[in-house]
């Protein structure tokens, strides 16, 4: 939802970055939505992971998810602003990635499904492995923060030209373009 309460679609471009919209460190803690196991399972159901995942999530998984999310949030912000990546954040991601991930399989009807044994820990390993791929892959230099003056959403620009500036054009992009237009037309300019 926007500040005005209007829904808009925000695609951060990677599974690991989808976790960042669940809250965050410091001032972002006020947006926290991961309180109990059902919250983490619901997030997984809304994520870009294929449908049908029903992980067994425990309260300790929620705490680990929040810790991973906070480390990823700070790591992503550092990358977006060209700052050095901090060892403690890298360590948190690498520790989560070291565990066994979710296991996908092909179902009898040819669709993708999940092998039995999906857990919160495996979900977090899968998210962390996605972060490793993002931060070491071809889009590592396209990690960005929304260009709007009052938005801090983080995303990876997967567009062909690589010039995405906004979390969502229909939200921040339009607001910023309208703001620039008003500034150009204001008395005493130009």
Image: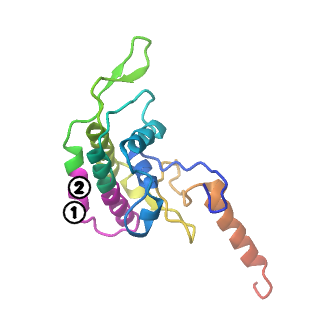
- Mark 1 and mark 2: span between their CA atoms? 6 Å
Q: Is 153 part of what is drawn in magenta?
A: no
Look at 57% across and 67% down and name the residue there: 148
Q: Nearer the viewer, residue 150 or 1?
A: 1
Q: Which residues are magenta?
A: 69-94
Q: Nearer the viewer, residue 165 or 10?
A: 10
Mark on residue 92? 2
Q: x and y percent of residue 132 in the render? A: 28, 48
Assess whether mark 2 and mark 1 are in contact (beta carbons under 8 angstroms).
yes
Look at 31% across and 33% down and name the residue there: 56
Q: Nearer the viewer, residue 7 or 162?
A: 7
Q: x and y percent of residue 85 in the render? A: 27, 64
Q: Nearer the viewer, residue 162 or 106?
A: 106
Mark on residue 88? 1
Crowd class of label 2 (few under 14; some 14 to 19; many from 20; radius 10 Å): some
Q: Is 74 part of what is drawn in magenta?
A: yes
Q: x and y percent of residue 31 in the render? A: 47, 60
Relative to 110, say whether 46 is above or below: below
Look at 47% across and 47% down and name the residue there: 13
Disc 2 secondary structure class: helix
Q: Which coloring applies here?
A: rainbow
Residue 141 visible to an observer of this rendering: yes
Q: x and y percent of residue 45 in the render? A: 45, 36
Disc 1 secondary structure class: helix
Look at 34% across and 59% down and name the residue there: 70
188 on left or right of 123: right
What secondary structure predominates along the stretch shown in magenta?
Answer: helix
116 on left or right of 40: left
């Amino acid at each position: 939802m926007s500040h005005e309460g209007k829904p808009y679609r925000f695609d951060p471009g990677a599974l690991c970055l989808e976790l960042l919209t669940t809250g965050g460190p410091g001032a972002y803690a006020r947006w926290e939505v991961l309180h109990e196991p059902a919250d983490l399972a619901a997030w997984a159901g809304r994520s870009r992971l294929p449908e049908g995942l029903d992980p067994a999530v425990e309260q300790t998984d929620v705490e680990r998810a929040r810790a991973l999310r906070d480390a990823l949030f700070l790591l992503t912000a550092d990358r977006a602003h060209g700052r050095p990546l901090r060892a403690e954040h890298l360590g948190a991601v690498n520790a989560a990635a070291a565990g066994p991930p979710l296991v996908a399989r092909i179902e009898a009807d040819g669709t993708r499904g999940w092998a039995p044994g999906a857990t919160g820990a495996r979900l977090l390993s899968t998210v962390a492995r996605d972060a490793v791929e993002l931060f070491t892959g071809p889009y590592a230099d396209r990690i960005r923060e929304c260009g709007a003056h009052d938005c801090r959403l983080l995303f990876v620009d997967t567009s062909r030209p690589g010039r995405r500036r906004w979390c969502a054009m229909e939200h921040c992009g339009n607001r910023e373009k309208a703001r620039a237009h008003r500034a150009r037309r204001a008395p005493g300019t130009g």
